Amino acid sequence: MSRQSRDFRGVIRPVGAVVLGIGVMLALCAGTAMIWDQLAPDTTRPQGGAVALVLSAIIVCVVGLSGFLYGARFVSHRISRREALLAVSLIWVAAGVCGALPFMLGAGMSAPDSFFEAVSGLTTTGATVIFDIETRLSRPLLLWRSLIQWLGGMGIVVLFVAVFPNLGAGGKHLFRGEVPGTTAEGLRPRIAETSFTLWKLYAALTVLEIVLLKLVGLDLFDAVCHAFTTMSTGGFSTLDSSIGGFHSAPVEYVIACFMLIGSVNYGVYYALLRTRNWRSLFRNVEFQWYVGIVALAVVLLTVLNLDVHDELLTSFRYSFFMVATTISSTGYGTDDYSVYSSAALTVVLLLMFVGGCSGSTAGGIKVERAVLMGKQAIAQLQKSFRPATVQLVRMGRVPISSEVLSDVASFFLIYMGCIAFGLLFVTLVDGVPVQTAFGAMLTCLSNMGPAPFHVGPDNFSTYSAGSKLFFSIAMLLGRLEFFTLFALLLPEFWRR
Amino acid sequence: MNIVVIGMGEVGRHLLSVLDKEGHDIIAVDSNPKAVQYAEEHYDVASIVGYGASETLLKVAGVSRADLVVAVTDHDEMNLIAALASKQLGAKHVVARVQGTAWSEWTEGIRYGLLGVDVVINPRVLVAQELTRIARSYGASDVVDLAQDRVELVQLDLEESRALNKPLSALELPPHTLVSAVVRDGELFVPGGADVLVKGDRVYLMGRPEGVLAAERLFSKEREARRVCIVGGGVVGKAIARDLLHQEATVMLIESDLATAEEVSAEFQGIEVVHGDGTDRALLEDHEVGTYDLFAAVTRQDEINLMAALLAQRAGCKRTATIVQRADYTSIYRQLGIDIVLSPRTVASDQILRFSRGGGLHSLTVLEDGQAEVVELTASAKCRAVNKPLHRMNLPRGSLLAAIVHGDDVIIPRGQDVVHAGDRVILMTTKDARPTVERLFRPRGE
């Protein structure tokens, strides 16, 4: 270690702890799946897979435990901002590697494929390289695939902060590394309690969805897997044809509603629970905009899709699902958007850009940022003819500081910059058409899943290993909202 | 416990650092966004930027559900209004700090129930009172009164004396006193009978005031300060002068502002008021500060206090005292050879922190940067520790039942002594022993 660089060994212990936690999750998942296979076997799916989970659990636990014990020597008194950023980044990469093990061991997938699949799960993207899910993945592996998506949804670091309440202000830095921007933070004064509250809400909603899906006729296994991937707005399905494969309008409506629920700021639900007053829902300005955007998009798509689905109600059914799956960046499919008219496809693309509310599990730029950017643009325009007037950008009644505004603007710049760079990389390496590369890049950065303008089947199996790794990084960037990972790239980060 | 701290100054931040570690739900309030950001950054607290006395803000901060609201901004009136408003909104306990000159009329350091505010504290007056007690002692560097002046806690830095280098059990301490803690090389421990005191140790003596005074005589050659020189005619300086005049000591007060100097001179007859700079070496020599028993630099500026005290020390003054706003610097002052270093911040936070403990502490004194603390509480009939002799109480290592106040009687307990319900007890615990001690004295079922 050179004299110029910082000592970052303090992060070994938290990263080790999280890896150990993932090992425990693997073991739990393996156990549950084995019992499940014993009690209610399903012969239509491939068998086995539990052994791969157990093996992975052992490997991951050993690595995690040794990191945890070795790191005890370097425990820092309080996790600093830098350490937090590094720890969060490492945790996510490590989680991706751990999550990939069962796919390598149990489904005979290559390392880049497995890593892509695991990262796509953890970041709740839901893009897949597996085109033959139904014949390749056994139930234990399917459960694991859905579980990592569920864990990544509310955030593994948030879970970590909830489980270890003694991190103090360090926990706050960790939390911000994973959930940046204006968020549900501040639900409770202490960050550990905030994290715990978030997870409780998340788990409660998931249970509610499992019950509802069971009630509308889904098999319990499918209900659990899909509830995991709906609440996390992830989008992994147990069927090749996704939700469309169930051919059931009630299932579609339940899932569509929960995707919309999942992409609302969890702070709103907390406020609702505490005040027990429905009006508190609509007091949240971002929520108002969100509802407006959803309503407008549903109406637009329903009308535009009348070409494809002749009947109004059918068109509504598919359009509603499409809006929900897109704005929540889930990525389930019931409808083929490649036959949409250009205008309808544009609506979908715009929804993909915007994404859900801040402080939710959804991806994208986030409604709040989009609204702020719009308002800031209007304020700047007004300045051109009324230069002396004080122009405050407000969210509801609250004036937004210029610091926050410049944060939002730089977020957007980085976002667009990433898309541009991604276009260059993917077209260079894989030689796909520009719009295909654009669709793939956008879907990864906004943690959506299906890629518009795709050539061939709508998955990532045809890309080269290099591009798959590149897309994995793009998904991580999108999930951690850029700043955390990009900070590590600056030389100043590592200097004393 | 839900706690709202209004004002992120020296005291506010210190409170956050202690309360955060103890695991409370804290909301920090200040009108300066930078100060709030600092708090957010360093402690696990939620925060609000705004005017602390505004009712809207207090509602947002949730004072109606708060167990404790502390108002420690730089503005006395704002503190009082914020505390008052919080109380009316339903806060359980409210504490306000005042310190300005407008309140110097106050000779009390603490007022209970003023304007409906549970506790109003004036740390400057409290510091002055502490300094006066030190001046009266035989060489102590800190004196704290407990149990309504019936028990005294005294800090003493040991010089060479007959009492050293022999086991504590062989030391003939006056009756009703004990050595409750020893600090050696910065580490505090509770001594046993076999421990030996050496030069350079700092000891904490506890007991009845008359006994403690006699015990001081055993360790120190110093006597009560008869001639005291004060630098600074502010709230603290005047309060010390007032108290010392009552005790018929000779007092000289140096003040750099002419109007203030004249004011002090008009207010107190019989003290020598010098108009001049306390850090002016020639002035100090002209007035022979070397002949004074105690030199106390108590202006509002830390730099002036430190320089003046160092100059007085060079001039041959036996004991020097300063107050320091930035309490973090205490140990540095000590290293520089200042005998007595007091901080209004520490005094204020001790007074406030006792409300964060629940169970109604009468007082809390934090020793050696939080290594140990002395608490004073009334033993409830429902707690585990009552009605059994001390030796069967299972007090953990690092803790000490220092005194039992039973009616008017003060007992320094031995193995057979018993705590009765309703007795006031004084306990000393190190940081590690605290949870166990709290369990012993917490009423069952709470």
Image (spheres, coloured by chain):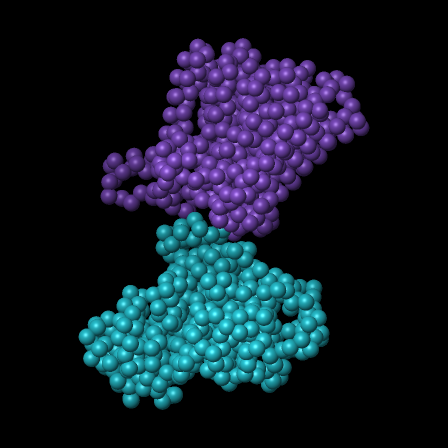
Chain colours: A purple, B cyan
Q: Is residue A425 visible?
A: yes
* Rendering quarter of residue B273: bottom left
* Rendering quarter of residue B227: bottom left
Q: Position of residue A458 (x, y in %)?
A: 55, 15
Q: Which residue is depicted at the point 73% across and 31% down?
A: A31
Q: Which residue is depicted at the point 30% across and 81% down?
A: B292
Q: Is residue B328 above or below residue A160?
A: below
| Relative depth, front residue between A365 and A484 | A484
Q: Position of residue B164 (x, y in %)?
A: 49, 74
**Image quadrant for the N terminus of chain A?**
top left
Residue A465 left/right relative to B37: right
Q: Is residue A44 above or below residue A480?
A: above
Residue A438 left/right relative to A383: right
| Relative depth, front residue between B310 and B384 | B310
Q: Which residue is depicted at the point 24% across and 81% down?
A: B288
Q: Position of residue A49 (x, y in %)?
A: 70, 22
Q: Is residue B63 visible?
A: no
* Rendering quarter of residue A229: top right
**Image quadrant for the C terminus of chain A?**
top left
Q: Is residue B443 above or below residue A273?
A: below
Q: Which residue is depicted at the point 77% across and 18% down?
A: A43
| Relative depth, front residue between B50 and A41 | A41
